[in-house]
Image: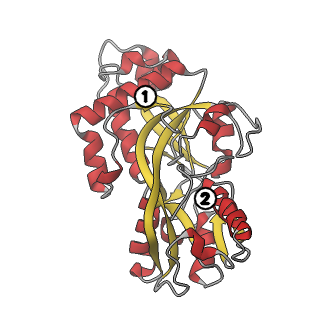
Amino acid sequence: MTASTTRRTTAARSRIAAVGAIAVAGALVLTACGDQTNSASTSTKESGADSSAPLYSKLPKKYQEAGEIKVGTDAAYAPMEYEESGKIVGIDPDIAAALGKELGVKFVFTSGTFDGLISSLNTGRQDIVMSAMSDTPARQQGLDDTGKKVGEGVDFVDYFTSGVSLLVKKGNPQKITSLDDLCGKKVAVQRGTIYEDTFKTQAAKCVKDGKGKLTIEAFDTDAEAQTRVKSGGAAADLNDYPVAAHIAKTAGGGNDFEVAGDQTAAGPFGIAVDKDNTELRDALKLALAAIIKNGEYGKVLEKWDVKDSAVTEATINGGK
C-alpha cells in the first residue's frame, strides 16, 4: 500500500472518536504541578506553577506566571487523545503530563475540530497544538496541498512516529489490501486530513490507470467515517496505524473493523508552536529530551502499547 508520508490534514487535521463516539469539545488540566517553594513569587503561587521543576527557568515568563500551557487538540482520536468520563485522555495527554513535570506548569487541553487547530494557534487562543498532527513542510510554511499560502507557518517539536493503515469492515468483505484495490469503490474519511489528500491522489491514479472511479465521502469527524464503513456504505477509512489498530481492537468488542494491508509511510507527529514563539518551542524540545532520557517517555508508550512509535531524540521540523 502506498500513501503520503504524513498523517492528518494539510489544511488542518484529523481525529478519531474513541471507538466510534463523536468527540465533545472540552477542557482538561492534565499535569499535576509539584509543591510550591517559599521563594516563589506571588503570581507563581497563584498559578500553581512549580518553580523548582528542572526546566522551569527555560519557559517564557508569561507561562511561568500563568502556570499553564494551553493546548489545542481534537479529542476524538483514540488512543492518541479522546474523551473518557468527561476527561481528555490518551497518549498525547500522558506525554504532555510528563513534559509538564519537567517544565513545572500544567498542560490544559481544549478540544475542537482538527481543521481549526492551527488557526487557534496563530490567533493566540492556544499556545501549542498537540493532536497527533503530522509535521509536514507545508504546515511549516503555512501552505495547502497545492502550494498556496493559506496561513502562518508553524514549527514542530517532533515526539512520535507513525505510519498509515486502511480500516475496513470486519471480515474485509471487499478484499481490500492496498489503495489500488479501492478503484471503482467508495471510501469514507475525515474532512481536511491528509488521509483525504491521500484518497484524492489515489482517485486520480485510478482514473489514469483506467481502473474505475474512486468516490470519496468526507465527514466532519472520523467517527462518522467509521460508521459509514461499518454499515457497508464505504469500503475503507484511512488512519494512523496506532489509531486504526486501536479501533479494530476495541470497536464492538473487536467485531466491527480490521486493519487491511500493511502499515506504510511512517513520519513524525509534532507539537505545533507559533514560529515567533521560539523560546517556548525550545523549552518543549528540552523537556522532550529530558523525558526520553529519564525513561518517562518510554513508560507512556509502553502503557499504550506503541513502543515502535518512539523517537530517540527531540528534533524540530523533522517532517519531510
* Labelled disc at residue 284: 1
Q: Is residue 66 above or below residue 311?
A: above
Percent position (x, y) of residue 152? 70, 31
320 left or right, relative to 124: left
Identify which residue is drawn at 67% across, 49% down: 115
Taking the spot 54% from the left edge, 52% from the top edge, the residue there is 7
Q: Is residue 174 visible?
A: yes
Tag 2: amino acid: Tyr
Q: Position of residue 161 (x, y in %)?
A: 41, 47
Residue 53 is tagged as none
User: Could you say which quadrant of the image residue 64 lies in?
Assistant: top left
Q: Which residue is mark 2?
A: 195
Secondary structure of the residue carrying numbered label 2: helix
The residue type indicated by label 1 comes to: Leu
User: Quadrant of residue 218 in the image?
Assistant: bottom right
Real-space CA distance between mark 2 and mark 1, rounded to the nearest whole angstrom: 28 Å
